[in-house]
Image: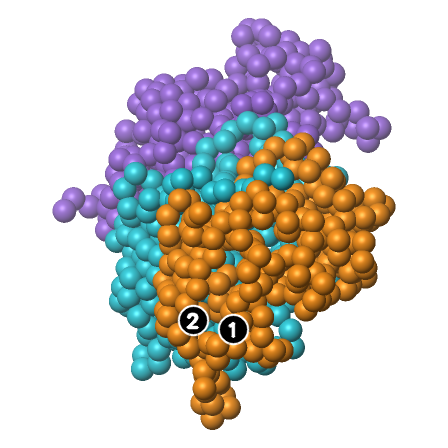
Amino acid sequence: MTVHQMPADDTKPAYNYAYLDEQTKRMIRRALLKAVAVPGYQVPFGSREMPLARGWGTGGIQITAAIIGPADTLKVIDQGADDTTNAVSIRRFFERTADARTCEATDEATIIQTRHRIPEAPLKSGQVMVYQVPTPEPLRRLEPREAETRKMHAWAEYGLMQVKLYEDIARYGEITKTYDYPVMVNDRYVMAPSPIPKFDNPKMHMSPALQLFGAGREKRIYALPPYTSVKSLDFEDHPFRIQSWTQPCGLCGAGDSYLDEVVIDDQGGRMFVCSDSHYCETRRAEGHRGTMLGDAAASGLVEETTP
Amino acid sequence: MTTMIQVENVAKTFTLHNQGGARLPVFDNVNFHVEAGEALVLAGASGAGKSSLLRILYGNYKPTSGAIRITHAGRPVDIVAAVPRTVLDIRRRTLGFVSQFLRVIPRISTLDIVRDPLLARGATPETATERAKAMLARLNLPERLWNLAPATFSGGEQQRVNIARSFVDPSAIMLIDEPTASLDAANRDVVVELIAEARTAGAAIVGIFHDEAVRERVATRYLDITAFRKA
Amino acid sequence: MTLHVAAAELDLEPAPLLSVDGVSRFYGERIGCADVSFDLWPGEVLGIVGESGSGKSTLLRCLAGIDKPDEGEVLFRGGAEPLDIYSVSEQERRRLMRTAWGIVHQNPRDGLRMDVTAGGNVGERLMDRGDRHYGQIRERALDWLQRVEIAGARIDDRPRQFSGGMQQRLQIARVLVSEPRLVFMDEPTGGLDVSVQARLLDLLRVLVRDLGLAAIIVTHDLAVARLLTDRLMVMKDGRVVEQGLTDQVLDDPHHAYTQLLTSAVLSV
């Protein structure tokens, strides 16, 4: 057995490479192999205690720890941004325990760990998306019994999932679920895509990247191998639609990205900006200017870059 | 002539298990037959078992032994040995029972009750409605009652609903138990006419009539069942 | 006057829909039900009567595919091939129970999703079988609500807001929407007021006749049995003590226990 030992350095505690012990990584890799072999199927695994609370991304971190190597470059995003506390902490965790190179550029990363978004820039073959999943079971709110939901998956009894969508339309005139919107994987398993906005659902379909999902608290791993069919559930007469906005990003002018609403002063002023911070920066660096970029730069919210 | 009912060696004894196994013999060695176009009136003192015999013919009481061959769909079927669904098919298509009492089904209108046998035999709703209305009118049931459920009707009105239901599409065999008990003279006459018409059309009729005048007008033959009483 | 004369043939179905052979279920030493055999034909309504603990509910659970009997087999002829419901996979059995069969529970809470609207409850079986057109599902749900006498305006209300009788009618609509061939009912009018019972019974009677359903109804109420069923099985201590045509069993009972049962009620 080859064990990647951390260098004996007095300043660092003697953790194994990437924090987890090798047996645990093997166990997780076995679960991952099974998950890749049966796309959308939830594989149970022995989720470990991690140095942060469950519910803060321990499932994703364990998967990343099991697949990361010295040659990898890691990008971590939280709410689409690379600079939020959780994203920064997780990046630093792997810098310290796995000597990982980290980055913010989507196309430079080999592993992208995320909770809420899929980057706007298209993913490439060879990249791995790692999703931190809070609630892996899409049927759980409808059917509380685990034994029953397993049977429903085993025999593809998904009428009940459709009932949930029916209820939305009956009550609100449309399917109101805007994130963690259930999908049918490979025409076989219904899967919860973690709390990404439904805007990102089409990006999963036939993606060239490998997509891995880890739920630390619920102890489940599932996966989408590259080029897997992923369809969002809907009705023939109420087809699936992604969110759209009436205005483009205030900073970079992008009309094709997922926007966050940001309150900019205490007079009720607000603007819509790309939730994918790296995408927005890249576009601004390329010279795209949104209508509010000047104001935002003047008040020090963003740096105005010149190409 | 076609034999519609052939009764062979029928015996009936009630055993009351909860009264010390008491045995109440009713009949023994009952043999008779009824032809199409005949009206056989059962005679015998009250308590002789006339109603019991009628119920046996209908398959409602099960004889202790013997056979009752009912000509159904062109061939004799032993109603004693027949499985329930065959008995029900015989009743639906061949064997009608006119009792003294209407078994009221909640919430069903008078018109629907009378239409029901026609619909069950495949008549169109229009034809069924038309014939049901004609029959109710003939029995002098006020039109305002037709769309009401008969639960609140008087005894005589309920009985007329019952007769209308039975004669709206007369069966090949009609078993009739005291149909005129609480009717006035005019309606009694209608019932007698209805029975006569059914008989003329070829029905085999077996009945019990307390009213001697009615009995005289209906009967083509009498059967005194006292002879079948068990000693 | 013309006389109704039956057509020449005995137009009866060629094979029973359900064949039950030697079904027994034991709870340790105690007998749940023992050696029950019968055939049920298409369109036939069978009543199972007996007092509490007589094994009628145990038998129903065995017949309906819920509890596997310890002995015996249950053969269902719904499709091309007869199906031994306990030798097929659980998947196949569940599929059967959602499509060709229906179960109406005594307590509507056991048969309804209480958090789902009336329309969703009725539509579930349609979505189970793959219907994916919202408008059509809703239209059929509306149609069925009306057939069970629930106002269409209540389609988006949840069963919690319904009375007991309405909940039971909703459960019936939920089961019948998939046009099952065989329906199991466990005390369908239990727990309802007498007036509500009458309405439900009448509704069931009409639906069973109009749809040509075969049904097995467990009840301790002989009036219910008389109104709804063609045939009766009387159970005592897990065994069938008497069976036959419903009116014959009730009016001319032969077994001591049946005589006791029928004499214990005022008028049925």
Mark linked to residue B225: 1
Left or right: residue B182 versus residue A239 is right
Kindly indicate which chain is depicted in purple in the rendered structure. A
Instruction: For mark 1, give the secondary structure.
Output: helix
Point out residue C160 in the picture as x, y percentages from the top left corner: 68, 54
Residue annotated with mark 2:
B30
Point out residue B151 in the picture as x, y percentages from the top left corner: 76, 59
Q: Residue at x 55, y 27 (%)?
A: C133
Q: Nearer the viewer, residue B5 or A193?
A: B5
Q: Nearer the viewer, residue B202 or A121?
A: B202
Which picture quadrant has residue C69? bottom left
Residue A284 can be seen in this image: yes
Kindly indicate which chain is depicted in cyan in the rendered structure. C
| Mark 1: amino acid | Ile
Left or right: residue A272 versus residue A204 is right
Residue found at the far bottom of this picture:
B20
Give the chain letter at badge 2: B
Give the chain letter at badge 1: B
Pointers 2 and 1 in contact (C-beta within 8 Å): yes
Kindly indicate which chain is depicted in orange in the rendered structure. B
Instruction: For mark 2, give the secondary structure.
Output: strand
